[in-house]
Structure formats: C-alpha cells, structure tokens
C-alpha cells in the first residue's frame, strides 16, 4: 500500500505563486510515476503534470505549460508542483497520484492506483 499526502494549497491572488508538495509513504518502491491532477467544481478530474521517478521524464497539460513545474526528491519520497502566474481558472482541488512502473507516462486517472485526499487551490481575481 502507498499513502500520499498533499500540502501547500491555499488562497492566492491572480498572478501569485504556490508550491504544492506530495509526500509518499508505505511501499514507495512500487511507484513508477507520480502525477498531479485537479478537479474544479462541476468538472471532470484532469491531468496537470506527471513525473517518472527513474529518469525524471515529465509531462504537462497544455493549459499549464510554462507556469507549472513538477519535480521530485526521491530521497524524501516527495514530489513538488511549483506554480507561478496563477489564474482564476487554476482554482481546483489538486490531487497527487501514484502509478506503478510502466512503459511510457500514464495520463489517465484509471492508470493510477494510489491517490491523496487533495489540497485546495483558490485563485481570486
């Protein structure tokens, strides 16, 4: 079993910055990729960014490219999401997710086995 805990969300003004963190515990050796998803009220959960732990390969949704940066500290079992130039459209519950090792980068919710409880990001206009 893998346990994920997010932190770092909050209320910020448009143009502000945040750094989200996700710490993994338990059977972390099972993890091949970690990702951030987000879900706004009334919308489906969507992929934001993914990082593959063994080689650092990353993926970003088009809507966040250039503003979001994903990184990981394998020694601390922690993944980060640095967000700059926040927009009201970024308001959502941000979830951390973990998937087992596989070829390629998993991009859909059903490819992820483990999920955190989410951290709220609210951007005021």
Image (tube, rainbow, N blue to C red):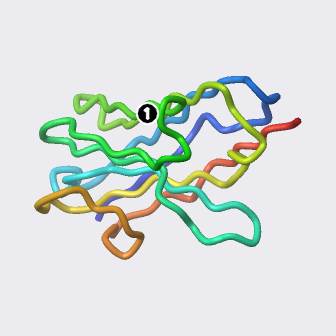
Considering depth in this image, is 14 or 120 the residue closer to the camera? 14
Considering depth in this image, is 28 or 36 the residue closer to the camera? 36
Q: Residue at x 53, y 55 (%)?
A: 95
Q: Give the answer, above or below, for where 75 lies relative to 58.
A: above
**Residue 46 x %, y %:** 53, 62
Q: Residue at x 53, y 41 (%)?
A: 64
Q: Residue at x 66, y 38 (%)?
A: 9
Classify 10 Å Cα crowding around label 1: few (below 14), some (14-19), many (20 and above).
Answer: many
Q: Which residue is mark 1?
A: 80
**Residue 59 x %, y %:** 33, 46
**Residue 79 x %, y %:** 38, 37
Residue positioned most to the right: 125
Task: Please tell me whether mark 1 sits on a helix, a strand or a loop.
Answer: strand
Q: Residue at x 70, y 43 (%)?
A: 121
Q: Quadrant of the C terminus?
A: top right
Horizontally, is 76 left or right of 54 in the view?
right
Horizontally, is 57 left or right of 16 in the view?
left
């Amino acid at each position: 079993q893998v346990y994920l805990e997010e932190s770092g969300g909050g209320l910020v003004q448009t143009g502000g910055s945040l750094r989200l963190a996700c710490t993994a515990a338990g059977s972390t050796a099972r993890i091949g990729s970690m990702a951030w998803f987000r879900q706004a009220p009334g919308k489906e959960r969507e992929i934001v960014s993914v990082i593959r732990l063994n080689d650092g390969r990353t993926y970003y949704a088009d809507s966040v490219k250039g503003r979001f940066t994903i990184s990981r500290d394998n020694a601390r079992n922690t993944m980060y999401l640095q967000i700059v130039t926040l927009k009201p459209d970024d308001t959502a519950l941000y979830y951390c997710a973990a998937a087992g090792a596989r070829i390629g980068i998993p991009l859909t919710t059903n490819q992820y086995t483990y999920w955190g409880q989410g951290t709220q990001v609210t951007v005021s206009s």
